[in-house]
Image (cartoon, helix red, strand yellow):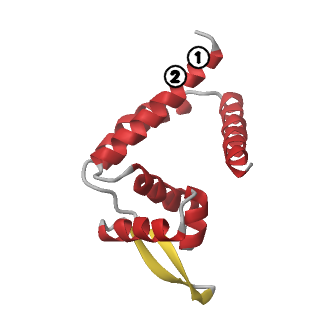
């Protein structure tokens, strides 16, 4: 299999997995992505989250409200500017989601652990470049 085909299959598997994970956690795809962004990027305003998700302010508010109702997120005053309200991940995940995520984290973690330092460095370079390429494509 050539690298292009392998890459396309990889991306399709990642997308299918995360759609199934959202479903397993009782979340819609947007709410799942919002929770993931809050977990990986840290606390942010609703406006920042909405821009990252490409949602209107009202749709973002509804998504945040759903995450709060599910116990996944909470609103809190910004410690640097008490006038701003941040949305942050609580660290909680819906039932069943942790087990599903572990099914991929363990084998992927083992594969990465088996890489040489140079291979791991190459993987890191690729992941950074791919992240920026996808973000850049959305911004244009």
The disc label shown at residue 5, or none: 1
Q: Nearer the viewer, residue 43 or 138?
A: 138
Q: Quadrant of residue 3?
A: top right
Q: Nearer the viewer, residue 56 or 74?
A: 56
Quarter of the image with the N terminus in it: top right
Outermost left residue: 95
Residue 107 in sight here: yes
Q: Name above or below for residue 114 compared with residue 71.
A: above
Q: 10 Å neighbourhood of mark 1: few (<14), some, or many (≥20)?
A: few
Residue 90 in sight here: no
Residue name at image x 74 percent, y 48 percent: 140
Q: Quadrant of residue 4?
A: top right
Judged left or right of residue 129, residue 110 is left
Residue name at image x 57 percent, y 24 percent: 8
Residue name at image x 45 percent, y 71 percent: 61
Q: 10 Å neighbourhood of mark 2: few (<14), some, or many (≥20)?
A: few
Residue 38 x %, y %? 50, 62
Q: CA distance from mark 2 to mark 1?
A: 6 Å
For disc 2, the marked residue is 9
Residue 98 x %, y %? 32, 48
Element carrying mark 2: helix
Element carrying mark 1: helix
Residue 21 x %, y %? 35, 43
Residue name at image x 33 percent, y 53 percent: 27
Outermost top residue: 1
Residue 83 x %, y %? 58, 90
Q: Nearer the viewer, residue 131 or 62?
A: 62
CB of mark 2 within 8 Å of CB of mark 1?
Answer: yes
Q: Name above or below for residue 50 compared with residue 86.
A: above
């Amino acid at each position: 299999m050539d690298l292009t085909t392998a890459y396309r299959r990889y991306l399709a598997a990642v997308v299918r997995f995360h759609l199934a994970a959202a479903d397993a956690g009782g979340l819609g795809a947007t709410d799942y992505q919002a929770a993931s962004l809050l977990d990986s990027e840290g606390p942010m305003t609703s406006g920042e989250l909405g821009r990252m998700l490409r949602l209107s302010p009202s749709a973002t508010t509804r998504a945040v409200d759903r995450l709060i109702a599910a116990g996944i997120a909470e609103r809190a005053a910004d410690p640097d500017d008490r006038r701003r309200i941040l949305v942050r991940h609580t660290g909680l995940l819906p039932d069943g989601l942790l087990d599903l995520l572990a099914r991929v984290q363990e084998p992927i973690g083992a594969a990465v652990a088996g890489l040489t330092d140079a291979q791991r460095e190459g993987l890191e370079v690729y992941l950074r470049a791919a992240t920026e390429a996808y973000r850049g494509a959305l911004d244009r």
